[in-house]
Image (cartoon, rainbow, N blue to C red):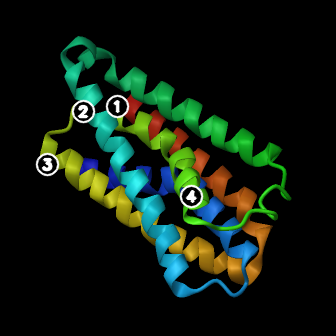
């Protein structure tokens, strides 16, 4: 049961980068069509789901070598990712997204860039069974889809006022999950 709660929290945490980019994408086109909103959310969700699965298989392959170190590895990865997200959000150039035309190629590369942290999160699932990992990945993908769809809609409606807060919140969640894995 705790892996479900962790999956939800990790899903929220790793989806915050994608949510922020999706929100910025919504800013670029105040007349963005629902079809493109779904495309953005779906593309981010696929990558946020596939990357932890890749990390799971790589991590699972070396599980026997690192079993006693998993809580420390998990904490380190999530802590570094969380701090990185917070620092990046505070140093971000708020105008850099304004000139991008939202082609599928741009959305594809945005999805890859925002899902790299999800790859390393997959390493932290190395002690899960395959069904647990698949459920976790599905939860992460669904959460990412919902948050990204909402992100585009919010960006379309309200602008960049929430951008920094979303990434800071995601970073804090990842740090909390890392601490939980270290102490529980």
Q: Secondary structure at mark 1?
A: helix
Horizontal arrangement in the rendering, residue 52 relative to residue 14 (left or right): left
Residue at horizontal 48 percent and vertical 29 percent from the top: 77
Q: Secondary structure at mark 4?
A: helix
Image coordinates of residue 30 in percent, x first then y, are 73, 84
Distance (Cα) linking label 3 and label 1:
16 Å
Residue 131's label in the rendered image is: 3
Residue 12's label in the rendered image is: none
Q: Secondary structure at mark 3?
A: helix
- Asked if residue 157 can be seen in this view, the reply is yes
Which mark sits nearer the N-terminus, 3 or 4? 4
Label 4 belongs to which residue?
105
Which mark sits nearer the N-terminus, 2 or 3? 2
Distance (Cα) linking label 1 and label 4:
28 Å
Distance (Cα) linking label 3 and label 4:
32 Å
Image coordinates of residue 176 in percent, x first then y, are 51, 42
Residue at horizontal 64 percent and vertical 60 percent from the top: 21
| Observer-nearest of 149 and 75 | 149
| Mark 3 Cα-neighbour bin, 10 Å: few <14, some 14–19, many ≥20 | few
Horizontal arrangement in the rendering, residue 124 relative to residue 77 (left or right): left
């Amino acid at each position: 049961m705790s892996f479900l709660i962790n999956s939800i929290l990790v899903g929220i945490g790793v989806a915050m980068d994608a949510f922020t980019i999706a929100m910025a994408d919504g800013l670029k086109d105040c007349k963005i069509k629902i079809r493109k909103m779904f495309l953005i959310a779906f593309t981010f969700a696929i990558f946020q789901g596939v990357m932890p699965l890749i990390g799971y298989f790589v991590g699972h392959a070396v599980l026997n070598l690192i079993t006693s170190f998993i809580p420390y590895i998990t904490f380190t990865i999530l802590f570094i990712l969380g701090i990185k997200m917070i620092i990046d959000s505070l140093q971000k150039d708020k105008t850099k997204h304004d000139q991008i035309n939202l082609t599928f190629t741009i959305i594809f590369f945005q999805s890859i860039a925002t899902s790299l942290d999800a790859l390393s999160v997959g390493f932290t699932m190395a002690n899960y069974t395959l069904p647990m990992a698949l459920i976790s990945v599905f939860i992460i993908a669904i959460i990412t889809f919902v948050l990204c769809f909402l992100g585009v809609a919010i960006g379309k409606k309200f602008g960049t006022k929430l951008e920094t807060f979303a990434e800071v919140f995601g970073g804090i969640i990842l740090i909390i999950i890392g601490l939980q894995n270290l102490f529980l």
